[in-house]
Amino acid sequence: MASFIDPLIAFVSTNAWLAYLTIFLAALLEAVPVVGSVIPGSTIILALSALVPGGTAATVNVRNPYEGNAYAISEGQRLFDWYNCSGCHGLSGTGANGGPTLVGKTDRDAVLKQVRDGGGGMPAFKGSLSEKEIQDVASYVTDRIAKSGG
Ligand code: HEC
């Protein structure tokens, strides 16, 4: 097994461009299932490509970009209740005792401004909420309530 693979690796090492071309063509063929099935072993070629020295392994960033957001939203949801936004805007923000519905309020800057400064019968929250809390509650409004469809 090793004796068969060794010269192959040596060849691939000295002709990296050819290897990459082969990998590219193999990947291309595999993308078409019908043709791919006629070329068995193209997967092996792909596997060998990992052995090419100097070849940079593709690092895939698997971090969920929504992670931080989801945390902010759940914090915001807690604050929405604690600071009685729900008292005026309803438990799910769809409007209640004098507060308008927040469904469709995706303009983050406008939401931030309203929460900070209040107005129109709504108290300002910049004195009672930290900047981070204001950001969190805005995330809850713009990313959850606003998109809830009422
Ligand atoms: C005392 C009742 C009351 C409380 C408490 C309250 N709001 Fe309001 N909110 C209002 C009223 C009334 C308006 C409408 C203001 C206007 O029309 O100018 C409003 C407007 C808003 C708007 C703008 C809506 C639009 O139409 O653009 C947002 C966003 C908002 N509130 C979020 C919040 C959040 C978040 C909290 C909690 C931190 C909160 N509100 C707490 C009564 C309240």
Image: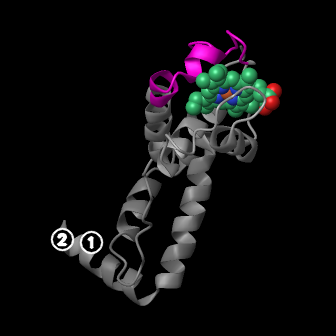
**Where is 84 relative to 130, above or below?**
above
Pinpoint residue 86: horizontal percent, then vertical percent: 57, 18
User: What residue is pinned by disc 2?
Assistant: 2
Q: Is residue 61 visible?
A: yes
**Where is 106 relative to 12, above or below?**
above
Q: Residues within 10 Å of mark 2 (few under 14, many from 20)?
A: few
**Where is 91 relative to 141, above or below?**
above
Pinpoint residue 62: horizontal percent, then vertical percent: 43, 52
- Residue type beneath disc 2: Ala
Is there a contact, CB below 8 Å, between mark 1 and mark 2? yes
- Could you say which is closer to the camera, residue 118 or residue 41? 118
| Residue at x 63%, y 45% (from the top left corner) | 32
- Return the mark for residue 5: 1
Would you say residue 71 sits in the magenta stretch?
A: no
- Could you say which is closer to the camera, residue 124 or residue 33? 124
- Residue type beneath disc 1: Ile
Q: Which residues are magenta?
A: 79-99
Would you say residue 94 sits in the magenta stretch?
A: yes
